[in-house]
Amino acid sequence: MTRNTLGRSCLLEANLILVAGVTNTYRLRWLRRVTDKNGVTVVRPMDLTGWTPHIQVRRDGLTVIDLAPYTLLDTDGTITIRVPDEATQGLPAGAGAWDLLLEDPSGDVTRLAAGPALVETTVSDTERSPH
């Protein structure tokens, strides 16, 4: 007997590295294949107008950082996550997990991306001190 798998855990499996104390910027683009009126398969961006992002880095069931406030969605399927250095300052180093859930205007949720997460610290100190 052959077993088949239907579905998947997410559309994109990716490692996320977040460096504490620096600005972290990530960009994803959600494209989908559709068949046009001529029967030709084309790639089109997903219009994310009105969608809501839910994105967290978690460790041992606890939220390390909620990235949703730093996530922008646009009409051409681009998801921009820009986390300022102030938001990452003092994050504890270590491994965890992350995922990006997108909720459409009707309330349906898609798990677009997920995977392991790693918070790293910098070697250099960004605090300015007199010379």
Image (cartoon, rainbow, N blue to C red):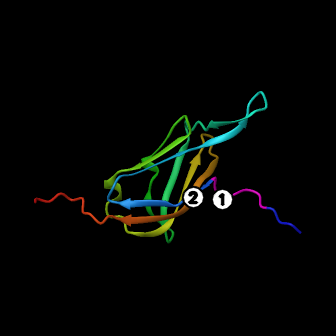
What segment is highlighted magenta in the picture?
5-11
The answer to whether mark 2 and mark 1 are in CB contact below 8 A is yes
Write down the residue under mark 2: 114
Quick one: quadrant of the N terminus?
Answer: bottom right
Query: Looking at numbered disc 1 in the image, what kind of residue is underneath it?
Result: Ser
Horizontal arrangement in the rendering, residue 106 relative to residue 23 (left or right): right
Q: Secondary structure at mark 1?
A: loop
Numbered mark located on residue 112 in the image: none
Q: Name the N-terminal-most of marks 2 and 1.
A: 1
Horizontal arrangement in the rendering, residue 92 relative to residue 1 (left or right): left
**Image location of residue 23, percent across then percent down:** 35, 52
Residue under the image location 73 percent in, 56 percent down: 7
**Image location of residue 48, percent across then percent down:** 56, 38
Between 15 and 63, the residue placed more toward the observer is 15
**Image location of residue 42, percent across then percent down:** 69, 35
Q: Quadrant of residue 94?
A: bottom left
Name, please, the residue furthest toward the right. Answer: 1
Tell me the CA gap for discs 2 and 1. 8 Å
Q: Is residue 127 magenta?
A: no
Name, please, the residue furthest toward the top. Answer: 37
Q: Is residue 6 magenta?
A: yes
Horizontal arrangement in the rendering, residue 67 relative to residue 1 (left or right): left
- Within 10 angstroms of label 1, few (less than 14), some, or many (20 or more) residues? few
- Within 10 angstroms of label 2, few (less than 14), some, or many (20 or more) residues? many
**Image location of residue 31, percent across then percent down:** 62, 41
Residue under the image location 39 percent in, 69 percent down: 93
Query: Looking at numbered disc 2 in the image, what kind of residue is underneath it?
Result: Ala
Write down the residue under mark 1: 9
Q: Up-down: is 117 above or below 77?
A: below
